[in-house]
Image: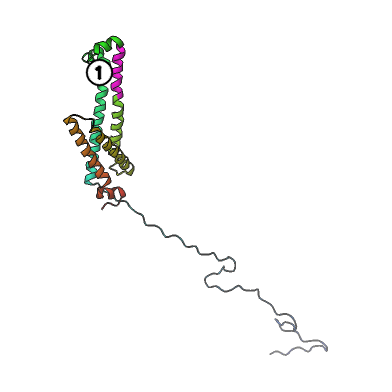
Amino acid sequence: MAALPPQPPGSLPPEPPGFTPAGGPPPVAPPQGPYSPGNAYAGQMPAQPYVSQPMPQPVVVKVHKRTFWLTIAQIIIILKAILILLLAAGSIAIGVYILAAGHAALHNIPGYDNYATQFGNSFVNAAGALFFAFAIVPLIIGIVDLVLGIIVGRPSQVARWIIVVLDVLSIIVALADFGRVNTSAGDLILVVYLALQVIVLYALLIDPPTRRNFAGTAR
């Protein structure tokens, strides 16, 4: 260690570097936040509460499979609609024929001479318009049945329940007609019609495979 040079009397020796005079406060470091491993910014950003995320729900796939009774019901509904449309077309054709042929088309009607004398051409026009009016209701029924018979096979729940309601109403009307029909041919037609309506009702409302098909759980 090198010797210090002589100092004048009454002076203190020089202080070494980094020496802090006695009595002074020691340096204080800035306060440190709590140590959190892996979270270097814990002292700057507040912790966010954990929110649980909902689990994704499984996708339910509906399974449809055409059944025997659904096919039979569609065939019956569509064939019935075609027959009703043919009936409406026949009524329209008769009306057109009456209007085109005039009095010659009606001369075989009992009492025609009296009607022709009293009403003239108005009688012919009224007869033609009557057949047109008779065709309106069957035409609407046939179109509705045809559309329902086609789309029920998708399958369509809306078409299914509309057909069921119309089928029940048709059965009630047919049962009421038994008292007004006095011929064996008329009774036979009603029996066949009722049998077909019952088949459609069973297929769409009762048959288990068809019900599963509409529910989307066909196996």
- Location of residue 133 in the rendering, given as x and y in whole percent from the top left corner: 31, 23
Task: Quarter of the image for the N terminus: give it.
Answer: bottom right
- Most extreme residue toward the left is 184
Determine the residue located farthest toward the top in the rendered image: 117
Quarter of the image where one finds residue 40: bottom right
Q: Residue at x 28, y 45 (%)?
A: 205
**Residue projecting furthest to the front:** 179
Count of numbered labels shown in the rendering: 1
Tell me the element at label 1.
helix
Up the image or down, 2 lies above or below 135; here it is below
Q: How is the image coloured?
A: rainbow
Was residue 22 drawn as part of the magenta stretch in this picture?
no
Q: Is residue 119 left or right of residue 52?
A: left
Q: Is residue 34 left or right of residue 7?
A: left
Q: Which residue is mark 1?
A: 97
The one nearer the camera, 130 or 97, is 130
Q: Nearer the viewer, residue 56 or 4?
A: 56
| Whether residue 192 is situated above or below residue 132 in the rendered picture | below
Q: Quadrant of residue 146?
A: top left
Q: Residues within 10 Å of mark 1 (few under 14, many from 20)?
A: few
Q: Position of residue 2 (x, y in %)?
A: 70, 89
Task: Read off the magenta span.
Answer: 119-133
Residue 9 position (above or below residue 26): below
What main secondary structure does the magenta stretch of the protein show?
A: helix
Q: Is residue 93 above or below residue 199?
A: above
Point 75% across, 83% down: residue: 23
Q: Position of residue 16 (x, y in %)?
A: 72, 84
Residue type at mark 1 is Tyr
